[in-house]
Image (cartoon, coloured by chain):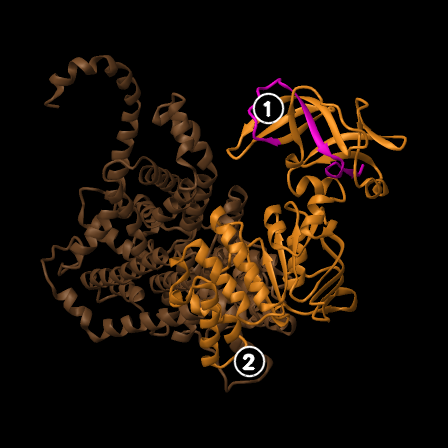
Amino acid sequence: MSISVQNLVKKYGSLTVVHGVSFDVAKGEFLSLLGPSGCGKTTSLRCIAGLEESNGGVIKIEDQIVSAPEQGIMTPPHERQIGMVFQSYAIWPHMTVGQNVGFPLSIRKLPKAQVEKEVDEALEIVGLRPLKDRHPSQLSGGQQQRVALARAIVGKPKVLLFDEPLSNLDAKLRESTRSEIRRLQRELDVAAVYVTHDQEEALSMSDRVIVMNQGHIMQEGTPKDLYRKPANRFVGDFVGRASFIDVTRNGESWATQDGTPLKVAGAKMAEATGGRHQAMLRPEAVELVEGGATPLANGEEINLVPGTIGESHYLGAYTEYLVKAAGASIKVHSLADLAPGSPVTLRFNRLDTRLVAVPE
Amino acid sequence: MTDNTITASTGQLAAAPVQARTAPDRVLQAVYYATFLIITVLVAIPILALVYGSFQTAAPGAGGTFTLANYANLTSSGVVSSMLTTLWIGLLASVLCIIIGTTIALIVHRTDFKYGRLITALVGLSFYFPSFILAMAWIIIGAPGGVINAVLRDLLGITAVQSDIYTAGGIVFVMVLHQVPFVYLTMRGPILGMDGIYEEAARTAGAKPMAVLMRVTLPLLGYSLLSSFILTFIITIEQFAIPALIGIPGHVTMLATQLYLLVRFTPADYGLAAAIGIMLSVITGIAIWAQRRVTKTGRLTTVTGKAGRATPIPLGKWKWAAYFVTFGFVILGLLLPMVILIYTSLLKWFTANPMNGMYTMRNYQFIWESSSTLTSFWNTLIVSGVGALFGVLLGLFASYFTLRLKPTGYRLLDFVVTLPFGVPGVVMGLGLLWAYANLTIVPLYGTLTVIILAFVTRFLPYATETIGGQMVQIDKSLEEAAWVGGATRLKAVRKILLPIVTPSVQGAYFLLFMAFFREISSAILLYTAATSVVSISIWSFFEQANWGLASSLSVVATLIIFIAMSLILWLMPAARKA
């Protein structure tokens, strides 16, 4: 394993911000830490970098223990051989682009010619070779981003760490930089830990995503797993858009508050967690049928729920309707134009009706 | 005015309400003109008088004629040598101050040093420790007949090594002790405000703590260091009390002391003194211009303002070096001088050996019993109390007009207000001496008023910097919202702006009070027996070798200054950062 985090604990005084978090990152793997602000994702990343001293647990980089406060081990950041990209880039304003990128090499006293050569290569990779002698103040935000990237990879680090590196870029640039970061990381074939609060970023870039909340891991899995089979309501709500219907167990089956039976998936996993339960629906998985219900053939794995159109938001490619049904407000994406108050029927597959636990 | 008739018909309807709104603004207009006039007169009179005096053959009021000889005499060997002495003492002292002050600031704010709060408080105190009192204490310690030699001779039996503070080295030493707190206070802000992320990036890039300091932290602070260096240099070459007390007995002459000697001792040469004053002002003026340039161009993205979580650098085995530098400075710059002064003030006759001392409270009793000392206290209270009020009002108006209202000519006002920065205190005193000894129509010469004028003019920039510093931070929209809500400009000022800037106005008042209380350089050429202030009394007692009385007065004056300082900190928590 390139990175191994076991039982990481971080406290600020009496406040514990990371509660015994454990995960591994394999060589060449791209792992995202996803969660709302204050969930402990950045703190965990800074503990791996050594910028933050952890209070418990073991962190290994390439099977070497770099942090184990119980054993009195705390390797300083400059001995960890990492590359890190910061949220505000941290491009040193008193150095040129070339000096910034060359810093990790020159600080390790590499021969000048070699530094020059490797800086040129790194700048070539991020497409900034012509700007080598510029000063940071002459660069755009996107270019500063690339300088930060080049500086992170130039020292051939064992691991790459990213602390919300795209949050200061505009939407278009963000998308192109995403794929560039991913391409670079694949070429270098190193482990990467990427911290973000943007679920789209996490889903599109990662091999694996860890969703965190209040210092705990809520779920760990591939992007598809997280989206399709969220372990609890928090993950379902935070990753992607979702609506929730309160449901209770009614013998062998499940029913909404007004008694309408619902065919659901994932009951075993949700019931194991305990607490209340809800059925989760993704807006794109629900079909909007005008008027009353059409009868179903027996044994069909389909749910039919009557409702009325509430608010609507026209978004160009589709309209998002909030449909009042089964005691909840359900988001549906549809191409149809419907007036508020129109009676409709919602039609959705059992496999798209995911049962999630709501911890109490 | 000429197109009145044309617009009259259309203007009539609108005219009435507009008239009503502009009427109270006339008050502001009048205040503006008054402020402009008073400040211009205050600043222009000493400067113009000095320029006039530098072209005169005889003393003020003695009916001299026009001459260029004073400027020709600037090239005489005496002036050139004191000019060179001034420059090298200034440069050496400033370099040492920057090194020590920045080191202390870095130790306190960037490492895991344990006693940061204590050191900050003590360095802050020593910043307000008057230079002439510090110099006196060190003369008692380091003069040929002082404590060090007594200890060497009587306690250790050493006669081969003798301490003599009356040297250029002695001047540099005491100046460094006096100026280090200034460097600390100017470097503290940039160090605290620097985004920790630049250092973190260097650490993750593989730099060891020392390399981070040398290659990232210090270069990023470069412009702040340069700016602080220039300011320190200005204050050092302007210094009067330290080079006078230490340098005159030791025949080490700097420009400020030469000017003083030319006026106070025969053969007096007021004209040459004025020319030296002009030269000194030109040097400081150039330095101030350079400093402004540096701060303007240096406003890189180095300090983002949002200070990140900067991780303290572990001192490890350097812990003892850190203790040595920080506590060493505090002891030499504040604690030891205070102890020596208190000790000296309690002695009947000075002796370096506390066992032989005859202790007495006589020196303190004398403060109450001597009418001349009481008069000087009374004078100081009037000068500081009333003068500071006058100064703060001028500063408040000047800041409001130059930063907020910006009426015609506000740039000129802004320029005039900052001019006193470039005029050393003793030069300001000489200018006023030339002015009021000549202008016999205005009977101000030898009055307390002329001392108040000197102090107010000299420290006007302090008031505008303190009040203006807070005023620029107040968003203009706060006032605009009041205008939209129906308030006139004057009402908006009274109801919105004034309440918000009140803390800085109060802070500026005590800052001026304190500055006036310890000011000596601009009063030294202006005082008479009836208008002596505390600082002058202390000076005179010391010159008469009455160390006991000088010490007891110094102890009392220092206490009053420290009380005023705690009032500032209490009123303006922001002053701690400034």
Camera-side residue of B159 and A329: A329
Q: Which chain is orange?
A: A
The span shown in magenta is A333-360
Q: Residue furthest right?
A: A251
Q: In this view, does B300 lie above or below A81?
A: above
Camera-side residue of B470 and A174: A174
Q: Is residue A23 above or below residue B393?
A: below
Quadrant (top left/top right/bottom left/bottom right) for the C terminus of chain A: top right
Residue at the spot 12% in from the left edge and 17% down from the top edge: B6
The CA distance from mark 1 to mark 2 is 93 Å
* Other residues around mark 1 within 10 Å, as few (<14) / some (14–19) / many (≥20): some
Camera-side residue of A286 and B130: A286
Q: Is-magenta flag for residue A339?
A: yes
Residue type indicated by callout 2: Leu
Same subunit, tags 1 and 2? no
Label 2: element kind:
helix
Quadrant (top left/top right/bottom left/bottom right) for the N terminus of chain A: bottom right
Label 1: element kind:
strand
Residue type indicated by callout 1: Glu
What chain does badge 2 belong to?
Answer: B
Residue with the mark numbered 1: A311
Q: Is-magenta flag for residue B255?
A: no
Query: Cβ–Cβ below 8 Å for labels 1 and 2?
Result: no
Q: Is residue B157 left or right of residue B529?
A: right
Q: Is residue B179 left or right of residue B334?
A: left
Residue at the spot 46% in from the left edge and 44% down from the top edge: B510
In the rendering, what colour is chain B?
Answer: brown
Q: Where is residue A70 in the image (x, y as percent from the top left)?
A: 79, 65
Residue with the mark numbered 2: B152
